[in-house]
Structure formats: C-alpha cells, structure tokens
Amino acid sequence: MQYDTHQKFSPTTLFLHWTVGLIIIGMLASGVYMVEQNAYWVFSWHKSFGFIVLFLGPVDLCCIYFTQQYMGSHIIENAS
C-alpha cells in the first residue's frame, strides 16, 4: 500500500478525491437541468449519485487520515 507523503498523495487518495469531485459537479449540473427543464426523471440518478458521494466522502477522508505519513509540516520518520 502506498502512503500519502508531504509531497505527494497516494493513487487511492487521488482516485477517491477526483471521483467525488466529478460526481459532485455532475450532480450540480443534473440539478440545474432537472429544475430548468422540469425533467424530474433525472431525480433518481441524482439521488443515487448523492448516496455514492455520501459514502465515498468519508472513505476519502479516512483514507487520507490513515495513510498519511506526516502531521502538519513535520514528517514522521518511521511511520508504517
């Protein structure tokens, strides 16, 4: 398992971060589309992706917390 360092985040952390970010942007776009076009058939997809973000957001934070090898600006030498 790769760990987050002061210079670089692990691939897992980056994947989760970008996945959550892209889903949130898509949800904003689908919400605007839904309201402006009265296309409420999108609501089920919007809600499903909302639950995915609700799950992946804390997983992303836990991944960062449990894989970091530094605290603040101080690098821990023998973190494993």
Image (spheres, rainbow, N blue to C red):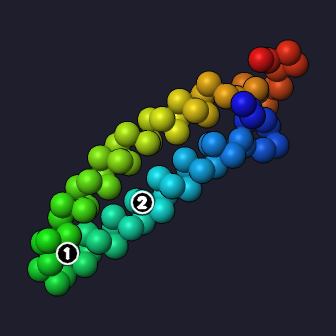
Q: CA distance from mark 1 to mark 2?
A: 16 Å
Q: Is residue 12 above or below residue 72?
A: below
Quick one: quadrant of the N terminus? top right
Residue type, numbered disc 2: Ile
The image position of residue 44, as x and y in percent, is 18, 61
Q: Which residue is mark 2?
A: 23
Q: Which percent across, then down, holds residue 25?
A: 42, 66
Does residue 72 appear anywhere in the picture?
no
Residue 7 picture location, percent across and down = 82, 43
**N-terminal label among 1 and 2:** 2
Residue with the most extreme right position: 77
The label number, if any, that marks residue 34 in the structure image: 1
User: Relative to 39, is 4 above or below?
Assistant: above
Please say if 49 is above or below 75: below
Say few, some or many: other residues with alpha carbon within 10 Å of mark 1 (under 14 / 14 to 19 / 20 or more): some
Image quadrant in which the C terminus is located? top right
What residue is drawn where x is 38% and y is 48%? Answer: 53
Q: Left or right: 65 with respect to 78? A: left
Q: Relative to 70, is 25 on the left or the right? A: left
Evaluate if marks 1 and 2 touch, with contact meaning CB atoms under 8 Å apart: no
Q: Secondary structure at mark 2?
A: helix
Q: Position of residue 65 (x, y in %)?
A: 60, 28
